């Protein structure tokens, strides 16, 4: 079955960087568009970025443009999110997401806290 396992979250100071990873299994990873979403306390889950299967087409939310970089390694079935210049408002649980055969799959999330 489809499994998505995020890692790499943690506590970081404003202006710092983190790299999130999402290990995928149970489906042909290289074929699917992969997504990062996040959910801050008391807020709805929101789109962060996505990347098509072969990587050339990428989309970012306005909040992520210029600071976050999404990438993937199809040989490792792994999705990444490099985050830099982090702000307190980036504090959230970050989720990996894929839609396959009209079914939505989410990872368990990884907590990112930006605070001094």
Image (tube, rainbow, N blue to C red):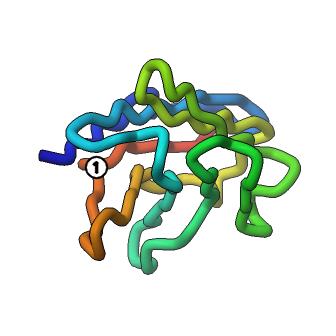
Q: Residue furthest right?
A: 66
Residue displayed at 72% across by 30% down: 16
Front-most of 106 and 100? 100
* Residue 50 lies in quadrant: bottom right
- Residue 46 coordinates in the image, percent (x, y): 52, 72
- Residue 7 coordinates in the image, percent (x, y): 38, 30
* Residue 18 lies in quadrant: top right
Q: Residue furthest top?
A: 75
- Residue 99 coordinates in the image, percent (x, y): 36, 65
- Residue 101 coordinates in the image, percent (x, y): 28, 69
For the residue carrying disc 1, how many other residues have a C-alpha within 10 Å: few (<14), some (14-19), or many (20+)? Answer: many
Front-most of 80 and 8? 80
Residue displayed at 41% across by 29% down: 77
Q: Label 1: which residue?
A: 107
Residue displayed at 66% across by 33% down: 82
Residue 39, above or below 84: below
Quadrant housing the C terminus: top right
- How many labels, in total? 1
Residue 106, above or below 85: below
Residue displayed at 87% across by 49% down: 66
Q: Is residue 92 left or right of residue 12?
A: left
Q: Is residue 24 left or right of residue 55?
A: left
């Amino acid at each position: 079955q489809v499994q998505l396992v995020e890692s790499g979250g943690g506590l970081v100071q404003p202006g710092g960087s983190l790299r999130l990873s999402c290990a995928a299994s149970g489906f042909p990873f290289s074929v699917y568009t992969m997504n990062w979403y996040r959910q801050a306390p008391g807020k709805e889950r929101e789109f962060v970025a996505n990347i098509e299967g072969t990587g050339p087409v990428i989309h970012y939310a306005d909040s992520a443009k210029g600071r976050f970089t999404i990438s993937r390694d199809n040989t490792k079935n792994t999705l990444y999110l490099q985050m830099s210049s982090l702000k307190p408002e980036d504090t959230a649980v970050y989720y990996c997401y894929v839609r396959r055969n009209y079914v939505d799959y989410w990872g368990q999330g990884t907590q990112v806290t930006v605070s001094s």
